Amino acid sequence: MEKNIPLSMDPKYYPVLSRVFSPAVIDKIVSTGKSAYLTEVCKNCDILDQLSLSTKLSNFLDLIYAFLFKNYRNEYIYKNTIANKVLLGKHSLLMNYV
């Protein structure tokens, strides 16, 4: 997952940024389309100044994930990596249709 990640921020914000992927925040985004926590984190970390306002939410979350993967590997990152390896190790994402 080595990508050129166009984000920069003070490392003190990494733990706060990683909580964007918590079930509470993701559930709020899914149910209402927004999250006060995500908005506050973006303001405090100066992320919004670094990205285009036309960035899709899915691309934005991918970017945050890639940034955390490279700079702050917390429990969520490790669990997600293991889950992906187990899933992709046992199951092919390509289905063969007969």
Image (cartoon, rainbow, N blue to C red):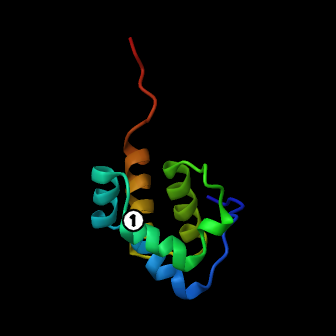
Q: In which quarter of the image is residue 5?
A: bottom right
Q: Quadrant of residue 82?
A: bottom left
Q: In the picture provided, is 73 more to the left or to the right than 4?
A: left
Query: The N terminus lies in which quarter of the figure?
Result: bottom right
Residue 10 drawn above or below residue 31:
below
Q: In the picture provided, is 31 more to the left or to the right than 9?
A: left
The kind of residue tagged 1 is: Phe
Q: Is mark 1 on a helix, strand or loop?
A: helix
| Residue 84 place in picture, x, y as percent | 42, 53
Residue 35 drawn above or below residue 85:
below
Instruction: Note whether residue 72 is visible.
Output: no
Q: In which quarter of the image is residue 24?
A: bottom left
Q: Count neighbours of disc 1 (C-alpha within 10 A) and say few if under 14, some if 14 to 19, many if 20 or more.
A: some
Question: How many numbered tags mark residues here?
Answer: 1
| Residue 58 place in picture, x, y as percent | 49, 49
Residue under the point 28% across and 57% down: 27
Residue under the point 37% across and 63% down: 35
Residue under the point 63% across and 79% down: 9
Residue under the point 43% across and 36% down: 92
Pointer 1 residue: 21
Give whichever of 43, 69 is nearer the camera.
Answer: 43
Residue 26 drawn above or below residue 19:
above
- In the orientation shown, which residue stands out farthest toward the bottom? 12
Query: The C terminus lies in which quarter of the figure?
Result: top left
- In the orientation shown, which residue stands out farthest toward the top? 98
| Residue 86 place in picture, x, y as percent | 38, 53
Give whichever of 74, 19 is nearer the camera.
Answer: 19
Q: In the picture provided, is 42 more to the left or to the right than 6?
A: left
